[in-house]
């Protein structure tokens, strides 16, 4: 066993354990940079929301909770399959590892597919910021009421006072944040392909599974970003 | 570089420079020492470019009216100077060159934790640099290195997207280096090398890396936001949509104030090494100096609003930012005090690295203290965006950052190249640089105090005499750099061979050969004593037959 | 210290069940009116979900102390960035800007 492990220890490390801890710490530090990277967008979101809460109410009402909620479930499930892939690698189950990686990737693509549907809808409804952006909060309010949604006092007030330009700001942030998240998903899917290839080549075992483990960390992180984006974009101000 | 290697190879046992000679052995190397050399060469080129831009607009500023340059060109030149010098010279300077070379050697490791990532960081850096150069060649950028919105995002007609992309990409290279250093220092220290036996340079690199890790991603996303606004026309800072251009300043300075510490903390680490070596004393107040690096790194994240006193930032926020800014002076003063205490009753010798350390102490102190004028809200309203600010940050970044870099370059030059530079010329150049620097920038304090705004192409006639002095100083400064380049280049071929420990210094890097073998040490060293044990004889792991003096 | 920690699959399944339940809960709560507390609850649930992912799926619970320190530092500095930036915007109208000169000192009619 230990001779097997040694084959994977790079020349500048003293032991497999040192190498594994280094890979783990390195990935966590990278994730800290990712947290700060998204931090800039979150800061913009928090500032603008605190300035224009009513526009945020209108903006989030035009997003589909159904699609957003479905995607949340999909990503959470993909985190489970990723965790199971690491588990399978830890316990020397190569075929199971490959299967869980494939499943993670598939769930990732499902998420991206739904995202494409959502983006297309925004194009259709002129909710993409820029010259063609158009939103009429009063008309949206009328639609809500026509659909039989109970519109409380706060909600009505928000729709009556929201400035369409500020709603456009909401959508700039919506696209920036979900777009940046999607870019990370695409990179993650690419990493899954790489992991799969190496798994099938038999590179990973219970003695050496650092790449599976640290790619898993990355994948879970992308999931966490969505865990925050979903309530912040879709659920804010529904009451 | 490879010619040097060839010459050395005939007489020498194999070291990291001589063990292979092909171009590929350099371009695809994963040896941290060779990557350091790659960085050194590329940074020298960027420094020359940034310096050339400064020389041009400094020449133009000799007269109050525009003679040499058109106003647009002038704007593009100072922008280029700022972008190149900050993102492509100062931020990477000591970490990417000295840190890359020294961190593994100083902690007795064979390499950094992720050698391939280290090489990738150089390629990413070069890609960023070439894209930024592309922006300059294809017509230039005129936003200033700060890329303030809404000018950068909406109105500027220059190549903002390319320049922003270049800076964004270069940011990743510093993140990769910093990540590597933290993991390396954390996980790969030699047996016996406890935290409080580490050289203070290592503490400084660790603190710097923390700042890079926490700050750089924020400026990265901020630059992405400019890109999104310019390219997709999604207003993120657009006042017409209710967006706030000052939000850009918040996000920008969240990184760019701590970035000053990315440039200065490594220098402080270097000064600790040099001062103790040339005073022959262990560093006074080791723990204080070590923790003050971390303190500077952390407090540095709470003060960014002092760049925004005259924006629409709230007076209360300004008050708190001003107050916190004074706090950074405390750990900085602790360091300076401890360096002076180290020298007190030491047996000081004035070798070239020590001259740069003295230069650092004087110039950085002036830079730091004038910072207090600017962090006081009332005086800042008068001094904001004047030459006073320009002089202040050049005293910090050149007087501190570059002096530290040059001190480090001279101190470890024998270790890196295996050759000694000519001491006489080196001292001469150090003095010329010191005089040239002061002549360039001291008049700028006065200019700014009298109301000369920064980034102006033309000015009132009464400012001319000070501008002429400044330009004259810049030529002296330039001459000093060129003398240095000449004798360092000469020493590569003709310099005296360096022994393993030419300064009789303490620390693992002096216990191996000059230059070190590829694996740094023939066997992993064990550390038994504290750093700076100048009261004990030096240790060597060099086999006796290789010892030369 | 962090010798290959293999967690039983049962743990993963429990965690995913809680995560899904919390997702349903956060959607449900969003439609009830708690005033400003709605935001607090939404973010609170998201933080709990994130912590579950971090601790169990990402094994932070069993990671080396230095790893946990870095993860914590990331969260702290994320909050610092947002909190300090927001503090500027929240305090902008605490201090009235001085009136323009013309209004404070009525301009002579001849001007
Ligand atoms: Cu600052």
Image (cartoon, coloured by chain):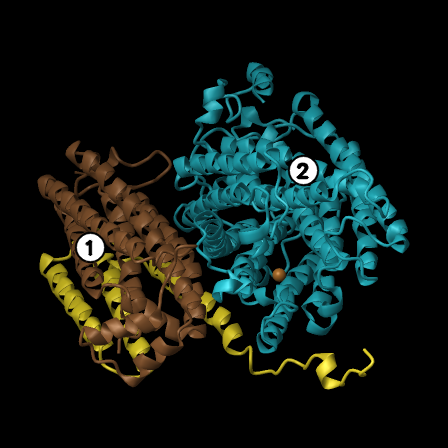
Chain assignment, label 2: B
How many marks do you count on the picture? 2
The quadrant the N terminus of chain B occupies is top right
Which color was chain A given?
Answer: brown
User: Judging from the image, what secondary structure is the residue with disc 2 in?
Assistant: helix
Q: Which mark is residue B376?
A: none
Quarter of the rendering occupied by the C terminus of chain B:
top right
Q: Is residue B412 visible?
A: yes
Q: Does mark 2's beta carbon lie closer than 8 Å to ligand 1?
A: no
Q: Position of residue A195 (x, y in %)?
A: 22, 39
Left or right of A14 in this view: C3 = left
Chain shown in cyan: B
Mark 1 and mark 2: span between their CA atoms? 52 Å
Residue beneath disc 1: A79
State which quadrant residue A193 falls in: top left
Establish if B305 lies above or below A200.
Answer: below
Chain C, colour shown: yellow
In percent of width and height, residue C15 lies at 15, 64
Res. B117 image quadrant: top left
Residue extending furthest toward the front: C110
In the drawing, what numbered circle is on residue B410?
2
Q: Residues within 10 Å of mark 1 (few under 14, many from 20)?
A: many
The chain letter under disc 1 is A
């Amino acid at each position: 066993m230990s001779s097997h492990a040694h084959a994977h220890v790079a020349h500048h490390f003293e032991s497999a354990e040192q190498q594994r801890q280094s890979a783990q710490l390195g990935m966590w530090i990278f994730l800290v940079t990712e947290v700060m990277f998204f931090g800039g967008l979150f800061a913009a979101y928090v500032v603008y929301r605190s300035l224009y809460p009513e526009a945020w109410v209108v903006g989030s009402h035009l997003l589909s909770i159904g699609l957003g909620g479905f995607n949340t479930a999909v990503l959470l499930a993909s985190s489970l399959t990723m965790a199971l892939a690491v588990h399978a690698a830890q316990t020397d189950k190569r075929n199971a590892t490959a299967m869980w990686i494939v499943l993670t990737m598939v769930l990732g693509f499902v998420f991206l597919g739904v995202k494409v549907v959502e983006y297309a809808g925004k194009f259709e409804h002129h909710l993409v910021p820029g010259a063609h952006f158009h939103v009429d909060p009063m008309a949206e309010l009328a639609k809500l009421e026509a659909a039989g949604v109970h519109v409380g006092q706060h909600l009505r007030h928000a729709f009556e006072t929201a400035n369409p330009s500020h709603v456009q700001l909401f959508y700039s942030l919506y696209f920036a944040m979900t777009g940046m998240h999607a870019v990370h998903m695409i990179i993650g899917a690419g990493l899954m392909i790489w992991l799969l290839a190496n798994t099938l080549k038999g590179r990973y075992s219970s003695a050496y599974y650092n790449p599976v483990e640290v790619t898993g960390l990355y994948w879970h992180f992308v999931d966490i970003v969505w865990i925050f984006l979903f309530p912040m974009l879709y659920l804010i101000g529904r009451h | 570089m490879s010619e040097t290697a060839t010459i050395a190879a005939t007489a020498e046992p194999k070291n990291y420079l001589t063990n292979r000679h092909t171009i590929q052995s350099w371009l695809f190397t994963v040896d941290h020492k060779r990557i350091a050399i790659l960085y050194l060469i590329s940074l020298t080129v960027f420094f020359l470019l940034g310096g050339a831009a400064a020389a041009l607009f400094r020449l133009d500023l000799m007269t109050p009216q525009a003679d040499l340059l058109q106003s647009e060109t002038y704007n593009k030149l100072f922008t280029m100077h700022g972008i190149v010098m900050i993102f492509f010279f100062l931020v990477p300077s000591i970490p990417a060159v000295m840190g890359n070379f020294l961190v593994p050697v100083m902690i007795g490791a064979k390499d950094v934790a992720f050698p391939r990532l280290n090489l990738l960081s150089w390629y990413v850096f070069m890609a960023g640099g070439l894209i930024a150069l592309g922006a300059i060649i294809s017509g230039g950028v005129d936003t200033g290195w700060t890329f303030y919105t809404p000018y950068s995002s909406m109105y500027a007609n220059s190549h903002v997207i390319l320049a922003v992309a270049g800076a964004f990409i270069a940011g990743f290279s510093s993140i990769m280096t910093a990540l590597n250093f933290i993991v390396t220092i954390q996980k790969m220290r030699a047996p016996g090398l406890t935290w409080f036996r580490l050289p203070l340079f290592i503490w400084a690199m660790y603190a710097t890396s923390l700042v890079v890790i926490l700050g750089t991603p924020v400026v990265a996303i901020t630059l992405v936001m400019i890109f999104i606004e310019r390219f997709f026309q999604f207003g993120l800072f657009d006042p017409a949509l209710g967006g706030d251009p000052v939000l850009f300043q918040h996000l920008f300075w969240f990184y760019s104030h701590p970035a000053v510490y990315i440039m200065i903390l490594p220098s402080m680490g270097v000064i600790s090494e040099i001062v103790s070596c040339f005073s022959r004393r262990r560093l006074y107040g080791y723990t204080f100096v070590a923790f003050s690096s971390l303190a500077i790194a952390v407090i540095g994240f709470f003060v960014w609003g002092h760049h925004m006193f005259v924006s629409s930032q709230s007076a209360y926020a300004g008050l708190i930012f001003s107050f916190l800014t004074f706090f950074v002076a405390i750990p900085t003063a602790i360091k300076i005090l401890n360096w002076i205490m180290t020298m007190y009753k030491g047996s000081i010798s004035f070798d070239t690295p020590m001259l740069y350390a003295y230069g650092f102490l004087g110039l950085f102190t002036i830079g730091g203290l004038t910072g207090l004028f600017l962090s006081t809200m009332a005086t800042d309203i008068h001094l904001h965006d004047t030459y006073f600010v320009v002089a202040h940050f050049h005293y910090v970044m050149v007087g501190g950052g570059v002096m530290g870099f040059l001190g480090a370059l001279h101190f470890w030059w024998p270790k890196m190249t295996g050759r000694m530079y000519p001491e006489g010329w080196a001292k001469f150049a150090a003095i010329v640089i010191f005089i040239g620097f002061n002549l360039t920038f001291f008049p700028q304090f006065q200019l700014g105090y009298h109301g000369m705004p920064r980034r102006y192409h033309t000015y009132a006639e009464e400012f001319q005499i000070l501008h002429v002095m400044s330009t004259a100083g810049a030529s002296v400064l330039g001459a000093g750099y060129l003398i240095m380049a000449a004798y360092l280049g000469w020493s590569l071929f003709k310099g005296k061979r360096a022994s393993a420990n030419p300064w009789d210094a303490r620390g693992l890097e002096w216990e191996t050969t000059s230059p070190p073998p590829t694996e740094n040490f023939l066997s992993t060293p064990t550390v038994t004593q504290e750093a700076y044990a100048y009261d004990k004889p030096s240790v060597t792991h060099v086999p006796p037959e290789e010892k030369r003096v | 210290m962090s010798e290959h920690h293999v967690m039983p699959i049962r743990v993963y399944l429990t965690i995913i069940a809680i995560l899904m339940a919390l997702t349903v809960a956060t959607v449900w709560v969003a439609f009830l009116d708690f005033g400003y507390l709605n935001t607090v609850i939404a973010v609170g649930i998201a933080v709990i979900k994130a912590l579950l992912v971090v601790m169990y799926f990402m094994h932070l619970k069993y990671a080396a102390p230095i790893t946990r320190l870095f993860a914590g530092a990331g969260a702290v500095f994320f909050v610092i960035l947002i909190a300090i930036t927001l503090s500027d915007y929240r305090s902008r109208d605490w201090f009235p800007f001085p009136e323009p000169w013309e209004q404070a000192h009525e301009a002579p009619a001849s001007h």
